[in-house]
Amino acid sequence: MSLVQIKVRGQLTLPSKIRKALNLEIGDYLEAFVQDDAVILKPQKIIDRERNRLFELIDKGRKYNRGVDPKEIEADIAEAVQAAKQEELKELRAKQQL
C-alpha cells in the first residue's frame, strides 16, 4: 500500500510501482469515482492510443516485409494478435491482484 498526498489544485502522483503494474503512461486517462468511503481510479483505454500503435506497427511491417508472401505476413500478424491478447489477459490478472 502506498501513501499519496494531494497537492496544489488537487493533484497527486501515483507511485511508479502502481503505474508500472497498470502499464500507465503520461497522457493516459483514469476514471475517478467514489465508492463507499474510497476514491477509485480506474484506467480507461482510449482507442486512439491503441490505433496509433497499430498503424506504427503496420508501417514498420511494410518496410521489413517487401517481397514476402502475403500469407506468411498474415500468419505473423495472427500470431502477434494472439500474443497481444495473452499479454492483455496477463495485465488484467495482475491488476486484479493489486
Image: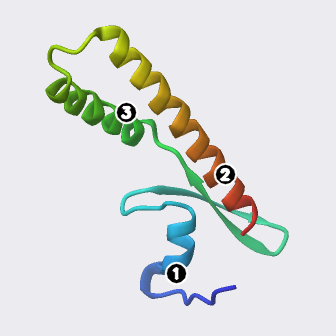
Location of residue 60 (image quadrant): top left
**Residue on which disc 2 sits:** 92
Whole-angstrom CA distance, mark 2 to mark 1, is 19 Å
- Seen at 43% across and 86% down, the residue is 8
Image vertical order of residue 70 relative to residue 20, above or below: above
Choose the circle earlier in sequence order: 2 or 1. Answer: 1
Tell me, yes or no, whether the two marked residues, 2 and 1, touch with CB atoms within 8 Å. Answer: no
Tag 3 or tag 2, which sits nearer the N-term? 3
Instruction: Work out whether residue 79 or residue 7 is closer to the camera in this orientation and state it.
Output: 79
- In this rendering, the answer to whether 93 lies above or below 18 is above
Q: Nearer the viewer, residue 40 or 82?
A: 82
Q: CA distance from mark 1 to mark 3?
A: 27 Å
Q: Residue at x 48, y 55 (%)?
A: 29
Amino acid found under the numbered disc labelled 3: Arg
> Mark 3 Cα within 10 Å, few/some/many (few <14, many 20+)?
few
Residue flagged by tag 1: what amino acid is it? Answer: Pro
Give the distance between the C-alpha atoms of the residues marked 2 and 3, in whole angstroms: 20 Å
81 left or right of 1? left
At 71% from the left and 54% from the top, the residue drawn is: 93
Which label number is shown at residue 15? 1
Q: Secondary structure at mark 1?
A: loop
Q: Which mark is residue 51?
A: 3
Quarter of the picture containing the C terminus is: bottom right
What amino acid is at disc 2?
Leu
Quadrant of the rendered image containing residue 33: bottom right
Classify mark 2: helix, strand or loop: helix
Q: Position of residue 31 (x, y in %)?
A: 59, 56
Horizontal and vertical percent position of residue 94: 67, 60
Report if residue 14 is visible in the image. Answer: no
